[in-house]
Image (cartoon, grey):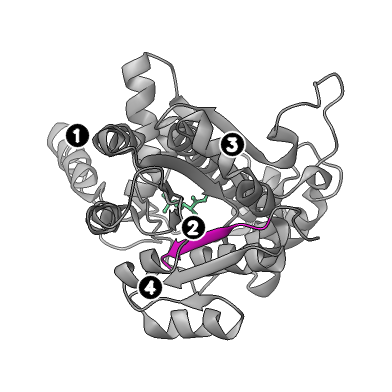
Amino acid sequence: MATDTPMQLGMIGLGRMGANLVRRLMRDGHHCVVYDLNESAVRELEGEGAVAAGTLGDLVAKLERPRAAWLMLPAAVVQPTLDQLTELLDPDDAVIDGGNSYYRDDITRAAQLAPRRIHYLDCGTSGGVWGLDRGYCLMIGGEPEPVARLDPIFRTIAPGVGSAEPTPGRHANGTAPDGYLHCGPSGAGHFVKMVHNGVEYGMMAAIAEGLSIIEHADAGRRKRTADAETAPLREPEAYQYEIDVGEVAEVWRRGSVVGSWLVDLAADALARSPKLEEFTGRVSDSGEGRWTVLAAVDEGVPAAVISTALTDRFQSRGLGEFADRVLSAMRGEFGGHAEKRSRP
Ligand SMILES: O=C(CO)[C@H](O)[C@H](O)COP(=O)(O)O
């Protein structure tokens, strides 16, 4: 592949996502000027053909006008970086925030930059570490003109039409079949990406729970002590299966209704480590799940699966421990039920 319309883009933030976006752009014939606080990340991409910048000012100076600068940064450092960067920009330049910022911050930022005619686009970017080869699904918000101007950049980053079968009966115009979509005005891109990540929480939780139920299908074989904490297992003979969950994930990948990239990834992880012993099971969350639930509450829309998946993550980090103590205490109070000190 090689683009018909090579463009120049400044990339600020060369972590796994930013660096691979640059590589994908350069592979397709675009020109990148790159900056990161981590100099070795800059040098590495310079070795691959990017133009290195030592400071934000240097990056701005090396970009042709109207400039386009893409931020690929953790949400917490977007604002300070933007404050410095936009001081150096001119009317008609465009900034694209490709990270996972809160869509409400996009609305504020775009409005603040509008009087200076600096365009601010929000671009939800999904694809993770696999995006270099698979491409990244892009969910874009902002004014139509800069979105149209940057089309060759979005087109290169996105997976392209070949990445999925065409949907029968769906019109073929527009860019969604290529894997990128102008979702609406400022904030709309990150709004759609926020909900995408909420969906991700729910799907991940369902896959994990299903595989866990299968992992425990031998519960009838496990020895229980007389003072076990749990009620006796009903019909132990019904739970006598020792099923290899890695093999189940593998077979689900083939023709099943739940086959998906997330199942592919689960199968991969289980193939490397059947009991996943290197994980403690503390699952982080970086904001999008919470914001999705807040939006559902504001809209008055039921979102039980995503909400539960979010609080499961809190539980995984021990944040439910106090509630568990209160439960245990109440149980002791009303029934004199002593808490079991050790697990069977
Ligand atoms: O955007 C992503 C995938 O689409 C990121 O991987 C996501 O930020 C991970 O989110 P969390 O830390 O909340 O699980």
Q: Which residue is mark 2?
A: 224
Amino acid residing under circle 2: Arg
3D distance between C-alphas at marks 4 and 1: 60 Å
**Magenta span: chief secondary structure:** strand
- Residue 130 place in picture, x, y as percent: 65, 62
3D distance between C-alphas at marks 2 and 3: 65 Å
Task: State which tag comes first along the sequence, 3 or 1.
Answer: 3
| Badge 3 density bin: few <14, some 14–19, many ≥20, Cα 10 Å | few
3D distance between C-alphas at marks 1 and 2: 23 Å
| Badge 1 density bin: few <14, some 14–19, many ≥20, Cα 10 Å | few
Amino acid residing under circle 4: Asp
Residue shown at the point (76%, 47%) measured from the top left: 160
The residue at label 4 has a CB less than 8 Å from ligand 1: no
Q: Magenta segment range?
A: 6-13
User: Does 12 sit above or below residue 262?
Assistant: below
Mark 4 or mark 2: which is in front?
Answer: 4
3D distance between C-alphas at marks 4 and 2: 56 Å
- Residue 13 place in picture, x, y as percent: 41, 66
Task: State which tag comes first along the sequence, 3 or 4.
Answer: 4
Residue shown at the point (35%, 43%) measured from the top left: 91
Amino acid residing under circle 1: Gly
- Residue 180 place in picture, x, y as percent: 64, 40
SS for callout 4: loop
Q: Nearer the viewer, residue 337 or 241?
A: 241
Q: Which residue is mark 1?
A: 335
Residue shown at the point (40%, 53%) measured from the top left: 228
